[in-house]
Amino acid sequence: MQGSTPGRYALLRSEMALPLPPVTTPRKRRTPSRSSSGTAKAAATTFGDVRKIGLTLPGVKEGTSYGTPALKVGGKLIARVHQNLDCLVLRTDFMGREILMQSAPDAFFITDHYRDYPWILVRFATVEKRALPDLIERAWRLVASKTLTKKFDVERGAHGMRFA
């Protein structure tokens, strides 16, 4: 990265220190919508799933943004439903966004509008529910105060809590 400042390299190193969650696995099409064991497939991810996970994080409140359901911490947006597409608009950093889009382009993308902003679009129909806790926690950490993140880390460490 020529022309970058040393501070930018430090930022990239710190961003890379956080592990990225598994996001999708290739799926074979089956007919009808039942797995090989005969049980129904898991339902597509919804904003309700995102809300349930997000509200377990300290300081997260429900709200709206562009007339759609949203999650905020300290008044700052971390996630919302896109107003026109069936997807989630999720706070991210630029390095994490690039990694996610390259690792699972069927689940993660941006439009030209988001190119210069730290947001990623997440397709509800494609992203796996098990990836949501880590994705939402990463978004929360980007905007939550240091006090909230420290409290969360201490409580989670003391209780060994992780999202199910």
Image (cartoon, grey):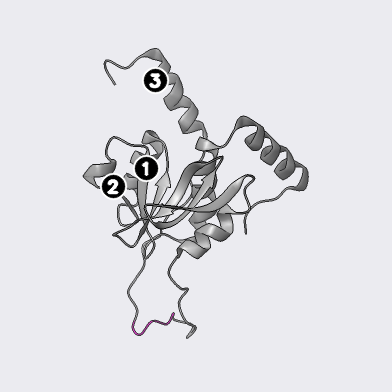
Numbered mark located on residue 119 in the image: 1
Q: Amino acid at mark 3?
A: Arg
Numbered mark located on residue 8 in the image: 3
- Range of residues picked out in magenta: 31-35
User: Are the residues flagged by discs 2 and 1 in contact, CB closer than 8 Å?
Assistant: yes
> Is residue 65 placed above or below 117 in the rendered structure?
below
First in sequence: mark 2 vs mark 1: 2
Numbered mark located on residue 158 in the image: none
Mark 1 burial class by Cα count in 10 Å: few <14, some 14-19, many 20+: many
First in sequence: mark 2 vs mark 3: 3
First in sequence: mark 3 vs mark 1: 3
Q: Circle 2 is placed at which residue position?
A: 110
Q: Amino acid at mark 2?
A: Ile
Marks 2 and 1, how far apart at CA: 8 Å
Label 2: element kind: loop
Q: How many marks?
A: 3
Mark 2 burial class by Cα count in 10 Å: few <14, some 14-19, many 20+: some
Q: Amino acid at mark 1?
A: Trp
Q: Does the magenta portion include 34?
A: yes
Residue at the spot x=45%, y=61% of the render? 128
Can you tell which of label 3 and label 1 is closer to the viewer?
Answer: 1
Q: Nearer the viewer, residue 42 or 81?
A: 81
Quadrant the N terminus occupies: top left
User: Are the residues flagged by discs 2 and 3 in contact, CB closer than 8 Å?
Assistant: no
Marks 2 and 3, how far apart at CA: 22 Å
Q: Hey, which residue is sitting farthest right in the picture?
A: 158
> Is residue 33 placed above or below 103 in the rendered structure?
below
Quadrant housing residue 46: bottom left
